[in-house]
Amino acid sequence: MMFQDLRHSNISKFQVSEFILMGFPGIHTWQHWLSLPLALLYLLALTANILILIIIKQEATLHQPMYYFLGILAVVDMGLATTIMPKILAILWFSAKAISLPECFAQMYVIHCFVAMESGIFVCMAIDRYVAICQPLRYPSIVTDSFVVKATVFMALRNSLATIPVPVLAAQRHYCSKNQIEHCLCSNLGVTRLSCDDRTINSIYQVLLAWTLMGSDLGLIFLSYALILHSVLKLNSAEAASKALSTCTSHLILILFFYSVIIVISITHSATMTLPLIPVLLNVLHNVIPPALNPMVYALKNKDLRQGFYKVLNLT
């Protein structure tokens, strides 16, 4: 009994020095084949978002708050994809699975920051559309360049400060035996699941963060679009109503995809033991598909952006 207690004491004092990111659970033997589509998605995300920034910079007609927010979204999308994709490709191509604890917690923080920032920018874009459609005469005086700067700084401060406890609480856990993470990136739940002590506080804060940040953002977006719909339905002209809604469709497509995947990931995490691949795959795709999808949806739905695209590429 004494030897067992001593052994247990020695194990509890041991702290792992690094984590091993195993990749996609259940398909380790052929997961390297996923590297090609993921690399193409990452390349597409970088190319499309850089092109969006160039178009907005060069076209004087796009120097408007709506397009400034789109440019900020492009920067956030590139940051989010770049936070995870190089490491994932290194795992799939070179089996570079080891990651130090500080690097893992840093990645965890940056991912949370960028995801929350994307949600915040969607709120800013929804408010911009609400004012443009419901208060068109007041739009130039409300949504100014100063408004864009203040809203962006507020969202950056909110998200960078609110997400600090996530890696801090994860770093306070004791990792004494297991160090293999069945994931491609350092997700909060995936990492803290390896801890030897109680991780209730981590789970509570994760839920609290999701409800306060994502929940409030989603509530404001729905409120904005409910008011937009109410305002549009009062228009006598069907053509005017159609024109007003057409400016919102691309935004709504991206919002529905962004939040629906987050909800699905949250639901499937409860089934991790039986189908561990689904939440991991969805988590990775959620961080790389929106950055590749956002510019294309806007370019297809927005006439001014399409014209700017043709000019930049010298197309007629």
Image (tube, grey):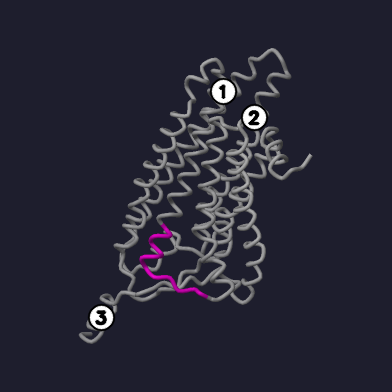
Say which amino acid is labelled 3.
Answer: Asn
Relative depth, front residue between 158 and 192: 158
Counting residues from the N terminus, which is met first, the one under dot 2 or under dot 3? 3
- Magenta region: which residues? 96-108
Above or below: residue 112 compared with residue 57:
below
Q: Where is residue 51 in the image (x, y as percent from the top left)?
A: 63, 46
Q: Does the magenta stretch include residue 278?
A: no
Taking the view exactly as shown, the residue that stands out farthest to the top is: 236
- Dots 3, 1 in contact, CB < 8 A: no
Q: Mark 1 points at which residue?
A: 132
In the displayed orientation, state which residue is furthest to the left.
2
Residue identified by numbered label 3 = 10
Depth-wise, is mark 3 or mark 1 nearer the camera? Answer: 1
* Mark identifier at residue 247: 2
Give the main secondary structure of the magenta stretch.
helix
Q: Position of residue 292 (x, y in %)?
A: 62, 51
**x, y percentage for residue 204?**
36, 51
Residues at marks 1 and 2 touching, judged by CB atoms closer than 8 Å:
yes
